Image: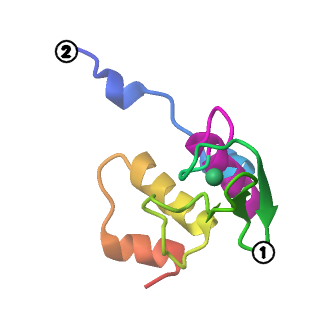
Amino acid sequence: MARNAVQFQKGLSLSAFQARYGTEEQCHAALVAWRWPEGFACPRCGGQRYAVCGPRKLFQCSACRHQTSVRAGTVFQASKLAATQWFLGLFLLTQSKNDIAALELMRQLGVK
Ligand SMILES: [Zn+2]
């Protein structure tokens, strides 16, 4: 019987996940790195210089003063859930061998 490579791919343990994405700062840094792998680029003018403003960590372009967040234009936009909850939900979805019920996900994350 042929060995299914998908079933034997290396996963990420819960403890390794928590060490990598356990805090809001770690999740924010990961989102920034995935969103702008070559450094920040203003969505309006393409400028690469910026300042980070306020508790929401908005990126303000130094050229045109346009403000954007790392979540803008993503599935996380307008969500009030913490990034750590999003990341944990995505981890549970992707690490489950079969699938995970919405109610089970709600229980695991403690959200409604
Ligand atoms: Zn700009």
Quarter of the image that includes the N terminus:
top left
- Seen at 49% across and 82% down, the residue is 111
Element on which disc 1 rests: loop
Task: Tell me the chief SS of the magenta region.
Answer: helix
- Seen at 55% across and 75% down, the residue is 81
Q: Quadrant of residue 33?
A: top right
Q: Which residue is mark 1?
A: 55
Tell me where the magenta segment starts and ends, as one range.
Answer: 23-41
Q: Nearer the viewer, residue 82 or 48?
A: 48
Please state the horizontal and vertical placement of residue 63, each as a whole percent of the image: 72, 51
- Asked if the stretch drawn in magenta spans residue 34, the answer is yes
The answer to whether one can see residue 15 in this image is no
Which numbered mark, 1 or 2, is in the foreground of this view? 1
Q: Which residue is mark 2?
A: 1
Please state the horizontal and vertical placement of residue 10, each as a whole percent of the image: 50, 29
- Seen at 65% across and 32% down, the residue is 38
Q: Is residue 81 left or right of residue 100?
A: right
Element on which disc 2 rests: loop
Please state the horizontal and vertical placement of residue 98, each as a whole percent of the image: 29, 49
The amino acid at mark 1 is Pro
Q: Nearer the viewer, residue 94 or 75?
A: 75
The amino acid at mark 2 is Met
Quarter of the image that includes the C terminus:
bottom left
Q: Is residue 95 left or right of residue 25?
A: left
Around disc 1, counting alpha carbons within 10 Å, would you say few (fewer than 14), some (14 to 19), or many (20 or more)? Answer: few
Please state the horizontal and vertical placement of residue 105, each as a whole percent of the image: 41, 70
